[in-house]
Each structure stands twice: as C-alpha cells, then as structure tokens.
Image (cartoon, rainbow, N blue to C red):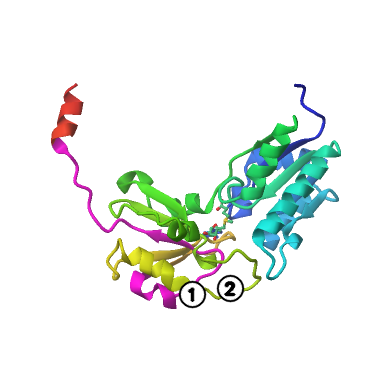
Amino acid sequence: MDSKKGSLVVVGSGIKTVGHLTQEALAWIKAADKVFYVVSDPVAEGVIQRLNPGKSESLTGLYEEGKRRMETYEQMIERMMASVHAGMRTCAAYYGHPGVFAYPTHMAIKRLRKQGYEAFMLPGISAEDCLFAELGVDPATTGCQSYEATAFVINGHVPNPKAALILWQVGVFGRGDYSRSNYQLKGFHYFVEHLAKFYPTDHKVCIYESAMFPGCKPREDWVAIQDLDKARLTPASTLYIPASERATPNLELLKLLESL
Ligand SMILES: C[S@@+](CC[C@H](N)C(=O)[O-])C[C@H]1O[C@@H](n2cnc3c(N)ncnc32)[C@H](O)[C@@H]1O
C-alpha cells in the first residue's frame, strides 16, 4: 500500500535537552508542519519552540490534577493522529527516549501504520542512559533488570539479587492519576515489603534523579531499603538497586567453552 500523505516521526529530547537532542531529532523538529511536545522543563520547551516557531504545541496541558493518566495518553494519541490524518508531516517530541515508558508514542505509531500512514520513532537519551553514566554503572558487570515500580509489585516479579535492578516511576507507586505536586504514596509499604522478600533490609539503594540542566548535579541519595518509606520521592525518581549477592560462575563450563 502507498503511504498516505501525512506522517508521524517521534523523537526524544533527552533528559538534559540542551546537549541531548540529537542532530537527527533536531532536523525532524525543524522540518515538521506540526510539532507536538511533552517535555518536563521550560528550557526544553524553549528549545523546541525556537526550532519550529508557530507550529509547535505542548500536549502537557492535557494532564489535569486527579485525571487518569491513561485518559490523557489516549487524548495525546488522538491529537497526533488527527494531525497526520489532516495531511501534516507531524513530529512528536517526548522527553528522554520517546519509546521508554511512553505508551502514547508507541500506540500512535502502531495505529497509524495500521491505517497505512508512515510512522516511526528515533531513539533518544533516557533516564537509564543517564544513570549508567552518572552512577558509573555498567549493566554488563552483573546484568541488569528493569521494571516499572507498580507493575513490579502487582505482577509479583521475582528479581535476581545477583543482578542490578532499576525501578522506574517509584515516586508514583500505585497511582494511575496525575498530580502536579509529589504524590501521597499511601500504599508504599507494599513496595518496601516486596523488596524485603529478596534483599536484606539494610541493603543500600539509590534514589536517582538525573540533572536536567547543564552544570547541575544529579540527585544520588543512598538509603537502606528499610528507610525508603521515609525518603523523599518525586515523579522524576528512579530507584537503582545494586546486586546484593555475588554470582557463582561455573568456571568448569567457562573453561570448556574457551577450549572449543
Ligand atoms: C513516564 S517515564 C518517562 C521516561 C523517559 N521517556 C525516559 O526515556 O527516561 C517517567 C519516569 O522516568 C524516570 N525519569 C524521568 N526523568 C528522570 C530524571 N531526571 N532522573 C531519573 N529518572 C527520571 C523516572 O523513573 C520517572 O518516574
């Protein structure tokens, strides 16, 4: 089937937009007939607005206090799709990597492709990429697991304590609604209890928030699991849990493999 006229390209603005926006993303933002963006700081907004003045529009206004985030995501998808249906070369810029913990971008692409439109995504720099750089973590060392915090508990995931664990959206644990300020996490003890099944409660974990502006330092607060409920968590917090046990390599097998 021939591609229809309108199209969608989804790009990431990175965490620290000044510096993280790739040349490729920048070119697509400039060339678009319509740019939608969901970014979390005014610097990123200013950068995008300057790249394509008059055609750039924030979708963050769709978030409302107490509204289900899923409802907002569906509205974002509708806005992106309507622009493509109207024949526009549409660009959607989401902060971080636009396909990492970003339901509306994946869904808009999927639905548009099904309708015969050209729709694709470019990679961006995610919070996890920043974490590897700023906390000095190489996922190759122990291996690395990555989950959304609420899904991690609700689905009863069993982490491997011999590998690192990254938990996203820990600051919105158990909450499907949107809040402008930090959330009241009334059920947070369920999260701590789940972790305590697999890790010693004095195991130190890091509340990580990558800096969004050049020259600023990331937040790296190391606390014991048993003290997590007293720690300040924000919607930008990611929890990094280093391995608490050492792996026990099968050296005989390694020797055998190397001899083959
Ligand atoms: C909806 S997800 C968006 C992730 C984003 N697309 C990315 O690529 O990083 C929001 C979650 O990303 C993580 N996150 C966002 N900004 C962050 C930052 N500045 N530092 C650390 N983690 C961050 C947090 O876990 C937060 O709850």
Residue at the spot of label 2? 182
Query: What are the residue bounds of the magenta stretch?
Result: 222-251
Residue in the picture at 44% in, 62% down: 239
The residue located at (29%, 63%) in the rendering is 199
- Whole-angstrom CA distance, mark 2 to mark 1, is 9 Å
Callout 2 amino acid: Asn
Tag 1's secondary structure? loop
- The quarter of the picture where the N terminus appears is top right
In this rendering, is residue 155 above or below 186?
Answer: above
Expressed as whole percent of the image width and height from the top left, the position of residue 7 reads 76, 35
Left or right relative to 125: residue 53: right
Q: Position of residue 98 (x, y in %)?
A: 61, 47
Q: Residue at x 51, y 64 (%)?
A: 237
Q: Secondary structure at mark 2?
A: loop
Corner quadrant of residue 167:
bottom left
Q: Residues within 10 Å of mark 1 (few under 14, many from 20)?
A: few
Asked if residue 114 is positioned above or below residue 99 in the image, the reply reads above
Would you name the residue on which mark 1 appears? 232
Q: Whole-percent x and y of residue 215? A: 55, 62
Q: Indicate the position of residue 187 as horizontal and vertical percent values.
A: 48, 72
Does any portion of residue 22 appear in the rendered image? yes
Quadrant hosting ligand 1: bottom right
Q: Give the amino acid type for the residue marked by disc 1 in the picture.
A: Arg
Q: Quadrant of the C terminus?
A: top left
**Few, some or many residues within 10 Å of mark 2 (<14, 14–19, 20+):** some
184 part of magenta stretch? no
Q: Are marks 2 and 1 in contact (CB under 8 Å)?
A: yes
**Horizontal relation, residue 226 to residue 147: left or right:** left
Dot 2 or dot 1: first in sequence order is 2
**Residue found at the very far front of the displayed protein:** 155
